[in-house]
Image (tube, coloured by chain):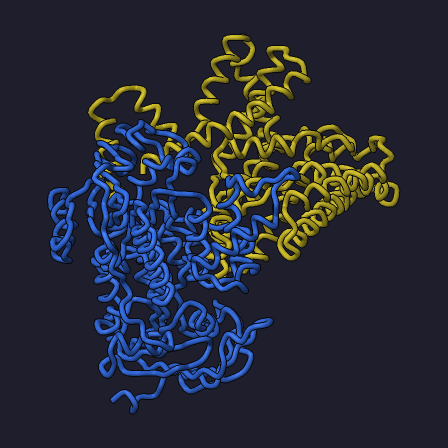
Chain colours: A yellow, B blue
Amino acid sequence: MTGSVETTTENQAVAGFSPLVLLKQVFLRAGVLPFFLIIALLIFSIASPQFLTVQNLTNVARQSVYLVLVSLGQMLVLITGGFDLSVGTAIVLTSVVSASTMVATAAMFPDAVWLVIALGLTAGFLSALVIGLVNGVGVSFFGVSPFIMTLGVQSVGAGIALFITGGVPIGNLPFEFGDFFGFGRVFGVPVPVLVALVAILVMWIVMNRLRFGAKVYAVGGNIKAAHLSGIHTARTLFLAYIVCSLLASLAGVLLTARVESGETNLGGTIGLESIAACVIAGVSLRGGIGRVENVVLGAFFIVLVQNGMNVMQIGSYMQMVLLGSLLILAVIIDQLRYRMLLVRR
Amino acid sequence: MQSAQKPLVEMTQICRVFPGVIALDKVNFELLPGEVHVLFGENGAGKSTLISILSGVFPQTSGSLRLDGEEIAFASVADAKSKGVSAVFQEFSLVPTLSVAKNIFLGAEPMIGPFIDRRRMEREAKDLFRTLGFDIDVRAAVGSLSRAEQQMTEIAKAVHSNARVLILDEPTASLTERETETLFRIVKDAQARGVGIIYISHRIQEFSVIADRVTVLRDGKLIGTVKVADTTPEKLVEMMTGRAIGQIYPTIERAADPQPLLSIRDLHAAGVEGVNIEIRAGEVLGVAGLVGSGKSRSFRAAFGLAPIHSGEVRLDDQDVTGAPTRTFLARGVFYLPPDRKNEGLILNATARNNINLGLLFRPEIITATGVSVRRQNALSTAIGREVDLTDAYMERPIANLSGGNQQKALFGKGFGRDYRIYIFDEPTVGVDVGTRAALYRLIKNLAEAGKAVVVISSDLPEAMNLAHRLIVFSSGRITAELSGDAVTEANVLSAFFRTEGEAA
């Protein structure tokens, strides 16, 4: 019965071939993101001739690396039906801890630069691992709501980072660190872009081809059903928060290398931005739904809008207003789409 | 013949104690290979507890569980499953956002090395449904399927796991007659392969078709195990309730007002293709049809729960098309939703609080100092008694009550205001015979007090026996309107199939 209803709609679409029906089909299938992208590209390229240049778009791609990494982790947690507000803290803590470790160990091993860097990275990842661990334990084993758990951890982590540094940036990092992870190229491709590409590929395989991905989708779709299917739901949730923190931490390392110092203000608005990127890309806040490729595009879109606004010389305060509005608009339109899908049934 | 076989499952002297309640008291149960064994009893009799123990949800407090003669204790549902005990629970264990194929293989996906073999997964799922004789798109998301299709997916999932013991908890509650036949065929196939099947159902008429033996439980105690061939429905009901219930369906006096209270004209909505209905005071209107035929959706659209595309709804000869649900409630129309857990009740609140919610707009509960708890409670106590809900249950969280008692509380919400029209959508889904009789008596009282009553039901005998006038839905249209002696099973079924033929 459902099938017959759908075929009639499709028949009408073919017979009429009106552009409006076609647009509706695209909207129902792919969501709001394609429309947002086209509108943004149109507005910005009309507003400024510098926008639609290869150089600027390459720039956008390079800038979007950090948000892409964080959004991939955020997506994982959103699909389980939670969210992670502490990604910014994971970045900050990674930055501060890895920077201080590098400065401290550089004094001990002045001749082994790469050992110093390796120790710094390990310390940074470990600090993010602790954040993920705390989030994971709280959410999956004690059943604390993800909102409260990650909000609390966000405050704790930010406090620790400020305490370690006294709010002062940690400079004097090994030159090779910034040179490779911040500005280096391998086969002509910037290292951060390469890292992001690998992360995207790995996450795509994880979500689409590995059992862990199937478990994440199942837990977010119906946690009771997942349990009855023999899935260790607590462990799945736990791992999701850890992977999320580690991806944020990876972004933290790349950002630290880019600014060549350990900073407490790197995290900034990335929590909000990563959730916005996911939601615009059609990740359901109810859990169970979300695709890696769309999220990458969503993160790219957010950075594109920021870049476009910069090119149009819109001030950073106004940018905050616009970004927040965009997020809310995306959610409203997503609700409309959901309703249209239901009516079609 | 059967006694010579070695039992597949042997549960002896099983006790299960929950804080304050003895859910099972020294119950013995035995399942033979190739046997369909019905568990029968009122809601709260201990059936669910027994199958929960057998399927590894929780362990027994005392007593022994043997599988193939070996004493065994399951660590979890997954553990039981791996040892060949697979259960299909009333609440679906499906993930709505995943495809049918993924759901069936959830937790046991075919792998190539570390990677999931999707092609094999989809191919095997397709083969599985082909052997089950059920047509379904294995790539469709489960959430987009009808309840019956979801049920079939759930059963396919259990069958797929090569279970030797298959537990079906009220599998036909959401199925139509035709789908039930498919299910029975699947059960018989499994039976022929030597699978032991535990079957929980309230539909006594099914037993003679499908079952070999029936075990009756009451208040956590074993009443007896009998062969279906040696017993009658009346005897089983007597065993279940401890008393004889003469007639489940009451005779309802008809005093239909010729002037319709509510009329629906040429209504079009999602899944509804032009429907005309008149609802009259003093009459019970039965509404029958397959799941997805639009019988429920027509009323939901008219009641403001779904958008109306075109058509008209008139109440007291005034146009109320597209009015919000609260307007209908304020003007005396009550709708009892079919899914009490999702739409009907606030599960973590007490039964009393749920009934009180229906009292919120009663003027007499407001005093100078705000809402009077005392007056509210006096009213809800009276309602609780009217719907036959034991006083002690009023203060319990409704999630802890049995399905039958939850349904009574839901009916209680209908007594909160002075309603004139009652639309009952699947009023007795998942409810035991004793409670059903009580609910039918309430329906009778309402109709005879001059209220207009609509009973939408997928349970054909229910719709037929309660209705003065019966309308039959198929593919979003009304295909028959029957009353008096014309209300026969043959007439109703032909109305199901008439349009089926046209549509195909």
Q: Quadrant of residue B7?
A: bottom left
Residue shown at 28% from the left, 78% from the top: B235
Residue shown at 46% from the left, 31% from the top: A334
Residue shown at 24% from the left, 22% from the top: A17
Q: Quadrant of residue A160?
A: top right
Quadrant of the image for the C terminus of chain A? top left
Note whether residue B130 is visible. no
Quadrant of the image for the N terminus of chain A? top left
The picture places residue B479, in percent across and down from the top left corner, at 15, 44
Left or right for A50, reference B139:
right
The picture places residue B265, in percent across and down from the top left corner, at 23, 32
Q: Is residue B273 above or below residue A328?
A: below
* B321 or B262, nearer to the observer: B262
Q: Quadrant of residue B121?
A: bottom left
* A282 or A285, nearer to the observer: A285
Q: Is residue A85 above or below residue B445?
A: above
* B242 or B493, nearer to the observer: B242
The picture places residue B407, in percent across and down from the top left corner, at 42, 57
Note whether residue B376 is visible. yes
Q: Is residue A301 above or below residue B352?
A: above
* A166 or B286, nearer to the observer: B286
The picture places residue B60, in percent across and down from the top left corner, at 52, 77
Left or right for A25, reference B231:
right
Count of marks overlaid on the render? 0
Left or right for A332, reference B483:
right
Residue shown at 27% from the left, 50% from the top: B291
